[in-house]
Amino acid sequence: VTTSENTGRRLENLIFLHLRKKYKQIFYYKDRGECDFIAMEKSAVKKAIQVCLNVDDENFDREYDGLLDAMINLGLKEGTIVGKGRAIDNIFIERFWRNIKYEKLYLEPSDNGLELYHKIKDYMKYYNQERPHQGLEYKRPMEVYRTAA
């Protein structure tokens, strides 16, 4: 563990220590791109994690492409970028949480955590498969996804 004042390096160390609690095999990936951590369990790749303290317009492509390169070459369907993102990246999740609060959670308060979990799960299915979205020309996200795939 380094004692550097470099906050980005400290974040990488923190992520490494967190991964080390669960995974005994952790590697750095480098091919066309670079990915900070590849976590393996019993010789099987489990996670690809890219760490970047501040994701911005200058480094987004490099960080994303490095993660994507690792995912493709190692056969992973998803990966994780850890760090603070660009403000624009939060628009979609902020809009989703606004919608779920006003369309479901405020109208139907839950009595316990399990009930809340099921309401959120059901709403996410509705949001993606049944609810038309103005930004998608009043199509459902799943329709758009299927036609693009």
Image (cartoon, helix red, strand yellow):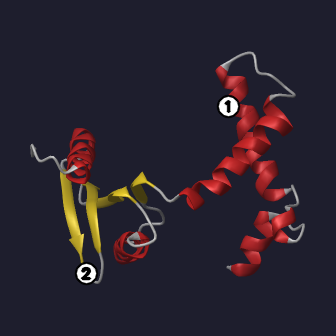
Q: Position of residue 105 (x, y in %)?
A: 79, 30
Judged by depth in the image, the label closer to the viewer, 2 or 1, is: 2
Q: Earlier along the polypeptide chain: callout 2 or callout 1?
A: 2
Q: Residue furthest top?
A: 111
Residue at x 82% of width, y 28% of height: 106
Determine the secondary structure under disc 2.
loop
Amino acid of disc 2: Asp
How crowded pointer 2 is (Cα within 10 Å; few <14, some 14-19, many 20+) is rated as few
Q: How many marks?
A: 2
Residue under label 2, please give it.
31
Mark 2 to mark 1 CA distance (whole Å): 40 Å
Residue at x 38% of width, y 71% of height: 59
Q: Quadrant of residue 52?
A: bottom left
How crowded pointer 1 is (Cα within 10 Å; few <14, some 14-19, many 20+) is rated as few
Left or right of residue 14: residue 138: right
Residue at x 72% of width, y 37% of height: 120
Q: Nearer the viewer, residue 123 or 102?
A: 102
In the image, residue 83 above or below residue 123: below
Residue under label 1, please give it.
117
Residue at x 46% of width, y 71% of height: 57
Q: Are marks 2 and 1 in contact (CB under 8 Å)?
A: no
In the image, residue 115 above or below residue 33: above
Q: Nearer the viewer, residue 17 or 44?
A: 17
Q: Nearer the viewer, residue 96 or 89?
A: 89
Q: Position of residue 17 (x, y in %)?
A: 21, 42
Q: Quarter of the image containing the C terminus?
A: bottom right
Q: Quarter of the image containing the N terminus?
A: top left
Determine the secondary structure under disc 1.
helix
Q: Position of residue 5 (x, y in %)?
A: 15, 46
Q: Position of residue 77 (x, y in %)?
A: 48, 66
Amino acid of disc 1: Tyr
